[in-house]
Image: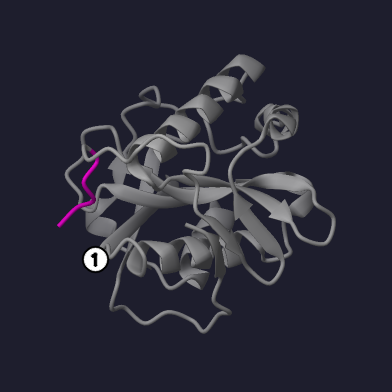
Amino acid sequence: MQPDLSRPHAPASDAVVVLRTDRLLLRAFGPDDVAAFAAMNADPVVMEHFVRPQTPAETEAFVARIEAHWREHGWGLWALERRDTGAFIGYTGLWPVRFEATFQPRVEVGWRLAAAHWGHGFATEAAHAALDHAFGALGWPEVASFTARGNLRSRAVMERIGMRRDPSCDFEHPAVPVGHPVRPHVFYRIAAGDPRPEHPRAERLRR
């Protein structure tokens, strides 16, 4: 059973579920986040395992898609805010796989953080919260994740949240040019009943 991407939720300004972990707030994107997000997406270190960095216009369009998806479906990607400083540090959350692929499920858990905030376990903490929401509030049976083969940082996060690689589903990403070094992707998955490392549970603040 896959999440129903066609069932609309009533558009509302408070469409985004807000979650709080020990150190993070998972919330809606706000106008003040866009410039920091654009700077992060233009950083070649952050975007090492993508075809190229994003332009500010591409970041603005991405945020618009994120907001529309929350309004239409009631789940999606969260902006990540550090509770100790209030700083926007990136995103994590759940996103549909839009390209043709042989694998199921067709929803992934993903993340992208500014390089200054790497190495503190923030991606792992936020990804655990996203999986808890997927398997709890949303009742999904399985979630996937994938990344460029050489992206060892993201692969380590996948393993730390209990995901397991399924080499039979490794694939060449169709949105990446043939021959590009980030075209080969590795595939990970986790089911609702699979064992996961112990972690503090996120608190739901709204919706």
Return the x and y of residue 138 as percentages of the image width and height. 32, 61
Q: Residue at x 85, y 55 (%)?
A: 85
Return the x and y of residue 126 as percentages of the image width and height. 58, 61
Q: Residue at x 61, y 59 (%)?
A: 123
Return the x and y of residue 33 as percentages of the image width and height. 71, 35
What secondary structure do most residues of the magenta stretch adopt? loop
Image quadrant in which you'd find residue 199 = bottom right
Q: How is the image coloured?
A: one colour
Asked if residue 111 shows in the view, the reply is no
Judging depth in this view, the residue of 142 and 81 nearest the camera is: 81
Asked if residue 132 shows in the view, the reply is yes
Query: Taking 178 as reference, is 141 left or right?
Result: left
109 vs 54: above or below: below
What span is in magenta? 1-5
Q: Amino acid at mark 1?
A: Pro
Judging depth in this view, the residue of 175 and 130 nearest the camera is: 130
Q: Residue at x 65, y 50 (%)?
A: 80
Magenta stretch: includes residue 192: no
Q: Residue at x 74, y 29 (%)?
A: 39
Query: Taking 176 as reference, is 23 left or right?
Result: right
59 vs 202: above or below: above
Magenta stretch: includes residue 3: yes
**Quadrant holding the N terminus:** bottom left
Query: Taking 177 as reference, is 99 left or right?
Result: left
Return the x and y of residue 200 as percentages of the image width and height. 58, 79
Judging depth in this view, the residue of 188 and 67 nearest the camera is: 67
* Residue on which the image places disc 1: 141
Binning the other alpha carbons within 10 Å of mark 1 as few (below 14), some (14 to 19) or many (20 upward) gives some
